[in-house]
Image (cartoon, coloured by chain):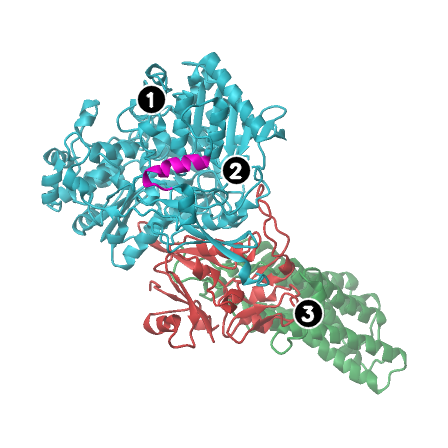
């Protein structure tokens, strides 16, 4: 029998993973940078943007639920379910950031540091969990690579830091180090992880994986994956942030924007493609489909 | 009690009695087949082996769906039946993505082909994910699952593999019975016999 | 699935399904508070033994189907526009009766055509009687020359009786299925066949497509559609030349063996393999296995009746059974005996005498197709549908003014749907009895609502299924004002003033049972069976009903009719070999009418539980051929013939020859395979429109 494609999760789930990842990446990277730079005044705009991205992603996901009223139960199975963990973590992240902002407005103090660290940890986990949701799907070989959760995590960070680079280009955040350099590093890491992931997948002999891989590089998803994910999503940012890092600062804002748009496009498209290309391993006893 | 089904592929002729009986009994909608039969073939014309493969929820021992369900709507009961509590399901479809046997279906608005009415409701499952429940209602009455009852070709058997005197337990001992995706150790409760190697 | 209803409210009724009408599977219907909950095959049924199919169970959806016709309908507005008004039975039947009598008075009874669909039990013979008492020579059926009639004739000519219809699977050690997907169409037979397999019986299946039953075969012979006669003669040649035939049986019970042997020598393996596209080795193996594994039974169906040379092929299959000594023996093909009820299969019952000879001579098609349309001692003469269509369209040889149609859908089910549509739109008056507004009924002037089998009392007595035993149908539901086919005929007969008909169905049923000193109520209240066990060997003992009293391998009768007394293979009228120029444009050989278990002819596509299992009409095409044409699984494709074009969904498979395709039957609109058919070239003598074994082409469509 032919491997059956995964059909349930598509655009909305990819968007949720992307937006949640970008929001969490933005929050986490910003707070980490702020802490390292010793800043005690936080940008409301950046944090609210991050929270909005996370919530918007979650709402998109909720719009696909068949029975959204039961979503209040969605964290109950955190013992074994990465989606339950993710649901709880999303909630915790938003709550902690809101608390942090309140504490910061009320003057800071000891709670500020605790909440900031908690928010960073929560953000990191929110950035990580979608990749783990996919990785833990035992029957979908396309997702069963350890590189995949790492890749998604790095994409989330790169999305967040990219947004920070753009924010920095419009109104300096004064961290004291080059965000563009960090972003370049993250894009390089993403490129490396994608290459490692692809080389593992390309060599797989599992029927479902092969069918999915063919979709990515030859089939309907070729444009989105190769042109979108790889070319636009990696090559363009590599150029932009490389230029920003090593060359003169002409058109800095433009380069930052172009680079970030590229990273965001790539972060979304790669997730979308990997969801859409995913196939279950075939069912049956007779060896070849006929 | 470990409810178990054994399907004899040598006898299954692909008549779809089981598929249709299940649809009628459970009032499932367009595109939803808790039980279904697929065709398998191998070889090249004219030397072709062809067989029919009934599929349904495998009620796995190590069920992926139970693990991933965020709301704990899906659970395995004391007799090994994997059950869905529709009142708890939020319809996220994670279980469908996770299921190795493509056994689960999302209940959404029906769109039958032109000229075909929507009949039967399945209304209590709207917006939730549904699947074969081993006819646990009938089991409680001492009856067999519907698909087993309607098979005229003696291709389906059902019983308790924990009871050594049960005919199904005997079949598991005496015949070569295998499960699908056995290497992955999901622990299906549906076994197949008469499988061409 | 609610278990809230207390078990005490449950009743179980035994009855017999009649969805396909042929099998009459015994079932139990479980009702809760009068609502049908479950329908299940009854393992205690003495004939069907628990065999049944999905259509039986899905019949529950017929009883509550929103699109069923509840009352008689009379057309308002123009034909085919869909304007109807509800009417009572009296008004509708009065209208039909007045029209039919008007036509009879003004233009002769022959201006009225009485048509029906396929066999669904004894009402088909009641319909014959109805037509004859009315006086028209022009009764017909959609199947007719394409269904049973040719093989019935072949069996009558060879055996003097229909032995092919009753394979004794239960005692057979070898089963030869020729052109039947027994699983899809004869569930109780398939059940017994598979039981025989479990017992160790061998199975040989001859079918262009590796269908359900073929998948279980020890040997599958994918014969080129239309070349079956050559294959069968090739097998007979192997059996005779290798001395594998039953010498004693042939000597005692057959005539013409030497002549047959001589003719068979013209069919050596190499030649047969080239003609049939089946490997030599496979043909020889099948012949040897069949001849040496005894007893062996033959299982055939109407596919043999749908090719250009239908009588010949069934005859050769009969001869296979004869030379191997498998006719009228246990485990072979045998003859059930009737339990003594009034026989419906007789000219006396159908009152053929009620139609004067000079009127019978006017039967449409009589001059061209005497084997179908004239009164031979061994058939029920019927009119030729293509001739009827032409008469409606041209007025030649005389006008056809009205059609009374029961349980049929000729717009979809007879060859050349384009012509059928033109004729049905043009005919002056069309009355249709059906459960739904079929495509044909949409064109009618009056539509009568017929009840489903769940809503009828009756006798389950399709002889092909019942093997002689009488069984009972018990009503468990009602729907609107619908009536059974027989009840409708009874009431209409009263309106028409027909003598020697019954006023109501219970009268008819009691009439049938009279020789048994039973009434229908007795049967219905009892267990409902009158057992007619299989009996073997009485023709061997008392002689076969042929001129020689023996099995006629060489048929005197055929000789008297001007045909060859021995079988011979003729290349189909349209084939890669007989019409190579045509084959350049249409290179593939087509078998149509592929059966699917969830449907029966043109019906049931609107039953949700069935449609969901097989939602689209599927084309079987060889995987390599599909690749060459750029066709992937599930692609929308066109099938073209010189006569029309249809749309199907592709199923690339290895289970079919690269130059053959399999087309399904009974779908409407662009998927209707009768749009591909020619109805002008018909089989010599019997008038079969050749539905299988013709040429076609396939191309991928824009998706």
Q: Colour of chain A?
A: green
Q: Chain of mark 1?
A: C
Is C9 placed above or below C584 here?
below
- Label 1 and label 2: CA atoms lie apart by 32 Å
Rendering coords of residue A171 (x, y %) = 84, 68
The extreme right residue here reads A106
Q: Is residue C496 left or right of residue C175?
A: right
Tell whether label 2 touches label 1 (CB within 8 Å): no
Closer to the camera in the image, C124 or A231: C124
| Mark 1 neighbour density, 10 Å: few (under 14) some (14–19) many (20 or more) | some
| Mark 2 neighbour density, 10 Å: few (under 14) some (14–19) many (20 or more) | many
| Mark 3 neighbour density, 10 Å: few (under 14) some (14–19) many (20 or more) | many
Rendering coords of residue C211 (x, y %) = 36, 48
- Label 3 and label 1: CA atoms lie apart by 91 Å
- Label 3 and label 2: CA atoms lie apart by 62 Å
- Asked whether residue A167 appears in the rendered view, the answer is yes
Closer to the camera in the image, C213 or C560: C560
- Assign a secondary structure to mark 2: loop
Q: Name the residue located 87 percent from the left edge and 83 percent from the top edge.
A: A108
Quadrant in the picture for residue C566: top left
Residue C513 is covered by the magenta coloring = yes
Q: Nearer the viewer, mark 3 or mark 1?
A: 1
Q: In this picture, which residue range is highlighted in magenta?
A: C505-518
Q: Which residue is mark 2?
A: C435
Quadrant in the picture for residue C481: top right
Q: Name the residue located 35 percent from the left edge and 18 percent from the top edge.
A: C360
- Assign a secondary structure to mark 3: helix
Which mark identifies residue A156?
3
Q: Colour of chain C?
A: cyan
Q: Colour of chain B?
A: red
Which mark identifies residue C353?
1
């Amino acid at each position: 029998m032919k491997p059956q494609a995964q059909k349930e999760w598509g655009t909305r789930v990819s968007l949720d993973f992307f937006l949640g990842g970008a929001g969490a990446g933005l929050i986490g990277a910003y707070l980490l940078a702020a802490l390292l730079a010793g800043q005690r005044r936080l940008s409301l705009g950046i944090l609210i943007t991050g929270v909005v991205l996370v919530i918007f992603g979650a709402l998109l996901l909720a719009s696909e639920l068949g029975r959204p009223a039961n979503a209040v139960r969605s964290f109950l199975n955190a013992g074994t379910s990465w989606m339950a963990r993710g649901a709880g973590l999303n909630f915790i992240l938003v709550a902690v950031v809101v608390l942090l902002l309140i504490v910061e407005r009320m003057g800071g103090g000891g709670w500020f540091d605790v909440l900031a660290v908690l928010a960073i940890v929560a953000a990191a986990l929110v950035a990580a969990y979608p990749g783990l949701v996919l990785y833990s799907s035992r029957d979908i070989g396309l997702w069963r690579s350890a590189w995949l959760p790492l890749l998604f995590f790095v994409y989330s960070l790169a999305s967040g830091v990219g947004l920070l680079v753009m924010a920095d280009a419009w109104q300096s955040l004064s961290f004291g180090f080059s965000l563009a350099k960090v972003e370049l590093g993250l894009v390089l890491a993403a490129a490396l992880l994608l290459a490692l992931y692809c080389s593992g997948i390309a060599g797989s002999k599992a029927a479902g994986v092969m069918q999915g891989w063919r979709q990515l590089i030859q089939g309907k998803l070729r444009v989105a994956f190769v042109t979108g994910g790889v070319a636009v999503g990696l090559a363009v940012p590599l150029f932009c942030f490389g230029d920003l890092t090593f060359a003169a600062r002409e058109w800095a804002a433009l380069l930052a924007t172009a680079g970030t748009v590229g990273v965001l496009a790539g972060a979304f498209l790669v997730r979308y493609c990997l969801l859409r290309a995913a196939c279950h391993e075939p069912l049956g006893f007779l060896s070849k489909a006929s | 009690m470990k409810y178990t089904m054994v399907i004899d592929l040598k006898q299954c002729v692909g008549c779809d009695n089981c598929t249709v009986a299940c649809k009628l009994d459970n009032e499932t909608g367009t595109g939803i087949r808790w039980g279904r039969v697929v065709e398998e073939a191998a070889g090249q014309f004219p030397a072709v082996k062809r067989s029919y493969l009934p599929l349904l929820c495998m009620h796995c021992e190590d069920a992926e769906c139970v693990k991933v369900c965020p709301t704990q709507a899906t659970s395995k009961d004391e007799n090994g039946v994997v059950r869905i509590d529709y009142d708890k399901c939020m319809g996220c479809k994670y279980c469908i993505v996770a299921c190795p046997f493509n056994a689960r279906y999302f209940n959404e608005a029906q769109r039958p082909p032109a000229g075909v009415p929507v009949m039967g409701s399945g209304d209590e499952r709207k917006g939730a994910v549904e699947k074969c429940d081993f006819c646990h209602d009938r089991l409680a009455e001492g009856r067999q699952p519907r698909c087993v009852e309607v098979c005229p070709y003696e291709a389906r058997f059902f019983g308790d593999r924990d009871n050594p005197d049960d005919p199904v337990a005997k079949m598991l001992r005496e015949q070569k019975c295998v499960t699908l995706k056995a290497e992955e150790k999901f622990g299906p409760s549906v076994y197949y016999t008469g499988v061409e190697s | 699935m609610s278990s809230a209803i207390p078990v005490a409210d449950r009743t179980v009724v035994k009855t017999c399904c009649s969805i396909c009408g042929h099998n009459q599977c015994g079932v139990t219907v479980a009702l809760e508070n009068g609502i049908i909950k479950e329908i299940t095959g009854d393992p205690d049924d003495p004939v069907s033994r628990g065999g049944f199919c999905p259509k039986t169970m899905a019949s529950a959806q017929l009883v509550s189907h929103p699109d069923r016709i509840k009352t008689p309908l009379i057309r308002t507005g123009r034909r085919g526009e869909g304007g109807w008004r509800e009417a009572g039975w009296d008004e509708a039947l009065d209208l039909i009766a007045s029209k039919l009598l008007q036509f009879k008075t003004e233009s002769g009874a022959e201006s009225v055509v009485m048509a029906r669909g396929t066999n669904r039990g004894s009402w088909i013979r009641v319909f014959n009687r109805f037509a004859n008492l009315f006086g028209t020579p022009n009764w017909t059926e959609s199947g007719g020359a394409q269904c049973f009639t040719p093989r019935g004739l072949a069996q009558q000519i060879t055996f003097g009786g229909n032995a092919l219809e009753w394979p004794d699977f239960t005692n057979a050690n070898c089963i030869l299925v020729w052109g039947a997907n027994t699983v899809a169409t004869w569930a109780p037979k398939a059940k017994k066949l598979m039981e025989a397999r479990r017992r160790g019986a061998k199975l040989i299946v001859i079918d262009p497509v590796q269908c359900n039953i073929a998948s279980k075969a020890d040997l599958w012979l994918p014969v080129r559609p239309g070349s079956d006669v050559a294959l069968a003669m090739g097998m007979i040649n192997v059996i005779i030349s290798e001395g594998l035939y039953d010498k004693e049986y042939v000597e005692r019970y057959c005539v013409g063996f030497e002549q047959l042997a001589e003719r068979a020598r013209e069919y050596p393996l190499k030649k047969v393999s080239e003609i049939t596209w089946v490997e030599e080795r496979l043909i020889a193996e099948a012949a040897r296995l069949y001849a040496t594994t005894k007893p062996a039974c033959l299982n055939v169906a109407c596919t043999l009746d749908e090719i250009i040379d239908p009588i010949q092929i069934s005859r050769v299959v009969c001869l296979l059974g004869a030379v191997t000594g498998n006719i009228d023996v246990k485990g072979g093909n045998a003859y059930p005996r009737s339990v003594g009820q009034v026989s419906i299969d007789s000219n006396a019952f159908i009152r053929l005498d009620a139609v004067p000879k000079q009127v019978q001579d006017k039967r449409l098609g009589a001059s061209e197709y005497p084997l179908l349309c004239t009164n031979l001692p061994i058939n029920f003469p019927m009119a030729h549908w293509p001739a009827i269509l032409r008469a409606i369209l041209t007025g030649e040889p005389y006008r056809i003014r009205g059609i009374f149609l029961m349980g049929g859908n000729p717009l979809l089910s007879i060859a050349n749907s384009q012509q059928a549509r033109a004729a049905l739109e043009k005919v002056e008056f069309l009355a249709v009895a059906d459960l739904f507004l079929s495509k044909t009924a949409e064109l009618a002037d009056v539509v009568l609502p017929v009840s489903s089998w769940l809503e009828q009392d009756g006798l389950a007595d399709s002889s092909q299924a019942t093997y002689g035993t009488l069984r009972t149908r018990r009503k468990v539901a009602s729907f609107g004002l619908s009536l059974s086919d027989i009840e409708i005929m009874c009431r209409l007969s009263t309106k028409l003033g027909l003598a020697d008909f019954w006023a109501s169905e219970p009268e008819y049923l009691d009439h049938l049972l009279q020789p048994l000193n039973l009434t229908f109520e007795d049967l219905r209240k009892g267990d409902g069976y009158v057992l007619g066990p299989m009996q073997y060997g009485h023709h061997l003992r008392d002689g076969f009903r042929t001129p020689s009293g023996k099995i006629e391998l060489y048929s005197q009768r055929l000789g008297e009719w001007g045909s060859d007394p021995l079988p011979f293979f003729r290349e189909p009228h349209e084939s890669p070999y007989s019409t190579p120029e045509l084959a350049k444009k249409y290179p593939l050989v087509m078998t149509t009418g592929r059966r699917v278990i969830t449907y029966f002819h043109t019906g049931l596509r609107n039953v949700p539980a069935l449609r969901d299992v097989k939602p689209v009409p599927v084309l079987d095409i060889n995987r390599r051929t599909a690749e060459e044409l750029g066709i992937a699984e599930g692609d929308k494709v066109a099938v073209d013939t010189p006569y029309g074009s249809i749309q199907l969904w592709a199923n690339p498979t290895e289970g079919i020859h690269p130059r053959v395709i399999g087309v399904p039957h009974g779908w409407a609109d662009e998927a209707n395979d009768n749009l591909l058919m020619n109805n002008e070239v018909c089989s010599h003598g019997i008038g079969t429109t050749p539905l299988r074994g013709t040429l076609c082409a396939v191309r991928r469509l824009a998706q």
